[in-house]
Amino acid sequence: MTNELRWNPILGEWIIVAAKREKRPWRPNYCPFCPGSEETGEGWRVLVLPNRYPALRVDAEVASSSKDIYCVKPGYGYCEVVIETPMHEGDLCDLSLEHLKEVIDAFSQRYVELGRDPKIKYVFEFRNKGAAIGVSLHHPHSQIYALPFIPPRVKRELDNSRKFYKENGRCLFCRILELEYESKSRILYENADFTVFLPFFAMWPYEVHVYPRRHVQNLPMLTEEERYSLADALKVITKAYNMLFDMNLPYIMAVHQSPTDGGEYKYYHLHIEFYPPNRDANKLKYAAGIEWGAGVFTYDGLPEERAMQLKKAVNKALNDLKKKEGYKALGAMVQS
Ligand code: UDP
Ligand code: ZN
Ligand code: ZN
Ligand code: FE
C-alpha cells in the first residue's frame, strides 16, 4: 500500500499520496461507527480508533522515488478517528457538557500520546460536518492526523506570531482578543475562560474563532475547569450555527495547537477555528478562482453584519438549550 509525501517545489508544500484511501466507504448504508460494529464494540461513550483507510501510516511504503527537485518521502504518521458518541446522529451541541469535555480530553490525550513519537512534528485535530463538506460518514466524529511536518497554514501562523512577539514582546492572539473586546461588535459569546468571535479578518462568511483567554499553547495545558469552559463554548456555538438558518449547518472545525517537534512555542496561542461554507441557507461560498487560484479571499457582506446575525443565533441557542434540555450555559452572549 502506497503512502508517500510528494514535495511541490513551486509552492513548497507536501502532498499526501495514499492509494488505499480511495477504497474507503462512501456514505454506506451500515454505519461502521455505531456501537456493536466489528470495530466499535459496546460500552463506550467516546472512542478513538485508528483510521481504517489512513492517509499516513508508520509502515508507509513509497511507490515512486525522488528525482532532482521531485522529492518523495514515506507518508509516515498516524490517522485516527474520534467517535464522539454512540448516537448515530447529531452535532457537538447535542452532547452533554460532561460528554463534550470527554471528547476534549480525548483530543488532549491523543495530542500528547502521538506527539511523543519523535518523528511526529504536528498533531492536527479537526472535525468535518455535513454533506457539503464532503464527509464520507455521518456518524458524529472528528479526525486526527499526526504529521511528520508542520502544516503550512499553521506554519504561517507560527511565523507571524513569532515575529509579532519579537517586535512587541507579547502574543499576537492575546492582542487580537484585546482588539475584539475594544470593538465588541464581533464577539458572540464568552464564559469565564473562552471567547467566541467572528474575527475582523474572517475569510468565510460565518467563520468563528474560539480563544482561551489564558495564554496557553495546547489542550493539555488547559485546567479541568477550562476544559468545561471550552466544552460550553463549543456547545453554544455549534448550537447557534444550527439555529442560524434553522438547519444543520455544515462546517470544518480546526484545532490549532503548538507543534510537537520539541521546539519552544511560547509565543503561540491555542485556538479553534470554524469554517462553515454557507453564505445563507441555500447558497455556498466556494474557494473558487480568486480564492483557490490566487489565494485571495473575498468576503461578501460585512463581518460585523454577519456577526450580528450570529449573536441573534447565540441568543436563540441559549434559550433553546435551556428549554429543551435544561442546559444552563456557563457564559452569556456579548452585547455590542
Ligand atoms: N473510516 C474508518 N473506518 C471505517 C470506515 C471509514 O476509519 O470502517 C474512516 C475513513 O477513512 C474516513 C473517516 O472514517 O477518513 C470518515 O471521515 P470523514 O467523513 O470526516 O471525511 P473523509 O476523511 O472521508 O474525507
Ligand atoms: Zn452510526
Ligand atoms: Zn496569547
Ligand atoms: Fe489559526
Image: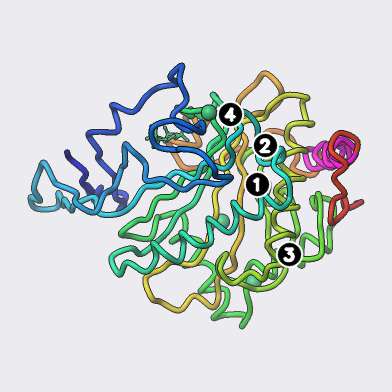
Work out whether 82 lies above or below 138: below
Labels 2 and 4: the sequence-earlier one: 4
The reply to whether the magenta stretch includes residue 258 is no
Q: What element carries label 2?
A: loop
Q: What stretch is highlighted in magenta?
A: 306-322
What x and y, as percent, mark residue 163? 52, 74
Compare marks 4 and 3 and give the one earlier in the sequence.
4
Estimate the spatial distance between the alpha carbons at disc 2 and disc 4, rounded to whole Å: 29 Å
Q: Which one is in front, 83 or 143?
A: 83
Q: How far apart are marks 1 and 2 (CA)?
A: 7 Å
- Do the residues bearing badges 1 and 4 touch, measured as CB atoms within 8 Å? no
Amino acid type indicated by mark 3: Leu
Residue that numbered label 3 is attached to: 177
The residue tagged 2 is 205
Q: How far apart are marks 3 and 1 (CA)?
A: 14 Å
Callout 1–callout 2 Cβ contact below 8 Å: yes
Q: Which of marks 1 and 4 is in front?
A: 4
- Residues 100 and 207: in front is 100
Answer with left or right where residue 97 lies relative to residue 130.
Answer: right
Q: Distance between the residues labelled 4 and 3?
A: 36 Å
**Residue at 10% across / 43% down in the picture?**
64
Kindly indicate whether the residue at mark 3 contacts the one at mark 4 (C-beta within 8 angstroms).
no
Q: Position of residue 250 (x, y in %)?
A: 61, 31
Find the residue positioned furthest to the bottom. Answer: 169
The secondary element bearing badge 1 is classed as loop
* Mark 1 lies on residue: 202
Name the residue located 59 percent from the left edge and 72 percent from the top edge: 221
Which residue sits at x=75%, y=58%? 195
Looking at marks 1 and 4 on the same chain, the residue that comes earlier in the sequence is marked by: 4
Q: Mark 4 points at which residue?
A: 88
Three-letter code, disc 1? Ala
